[in-house]
Amino acid sequence: MVKFANSSLFVMLSGDCKLSFDSSCYSFNTEQSTWPNNRKKCMEKGGDLVSLETEEEWAFVNEQIQKLNTEEWHIGLQKEEGWQWVSGKPLTITKWQGGQPSGDGPFVVMAKEYPPNTFGLFNDLPDYVPRGYICEKPKVGNWLHCLSIYSLTTPKECTAVQKIERSK
Ligand SMILES: [Ca+2]
């Protein structure tokens, strides 16, 4: 654990991050709901459905779901103009299952291994299909960013940090 002058703040903010990769925390939620509901639940926890912008991030998440007993997971990939991550980035990794996307709907699940040999591959589904879901939220990158610049600017995402600083 890296120590900072205000280490109590750092520990508090990173305390609920059990699974991290690069600058994000991930949570794997096995209770099943619709894609829009699941997205809402991620956002309420300060994140969003997972956006897999790189091959490495996809591999990390796939490794995690192979250890769990849920077959299909909602991820933050949806069809707007084209297939797009909720982070705003376009889909650049090639992970569709054979014959997918089949036009079933605008939302995407990532499979553990069904249909056979589809480890981590994607399928498009309509919104009403309940599935588990994977959330992603910033780890400490944004907070460290805030801590280093809060005295110069007032970015929206730094408000909580500034409040704590002021109350000291
Ligand atoms: Ca499909």
Image (cartoon, grey):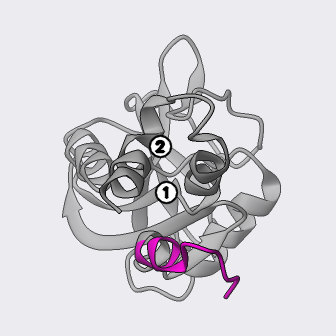
Identify the residue at horizontal 50%, vertical 67% (top origin): 26
Question: 84 or 94: nearer the eye?
Answer: 84
Residue 162 painted magenta: no
Q: Are marks 1 and 2 in contact (CB under 8 Å)?
A: yes
* Above or below for 69 versus 6: below
Residue 19 in picture, x, y percent from top left? 55, 78
Q: Which residues are magenta?
A: 1-12
Amino acid carrying mark 2 in the image: Gly
Amino acid carrying mark 1 in the image: Glu
Residue 154 shows in the view: yes
Residue 119 shows in the view: no
Q: CA distance from mark 1 to mark 2?
A: 9 Å
Residue 144 in picture, x, y percent from top left? 63, 56
Q: Hey, which residue is sitting farthest top in the picture?
A: 81
Question: 165 or 66: nearer the eye?
Answer: 165
Q: Which mark is residue 136?
A: 1
* Above or below for 56 versus 158: below
* Above or below for 147 versus 22: above
* Above or below for 60 versus 152: below
Question: Nearer the viewer's eye, disc 1 or disc 2?
Answer: 1
Residue 136 in picture, x, y percent from top left? 49, 57
Query: Is 27 on the left or on the right of 64, as rendered?
Result: left
Snapshot quadrant of residue 68: bottom left
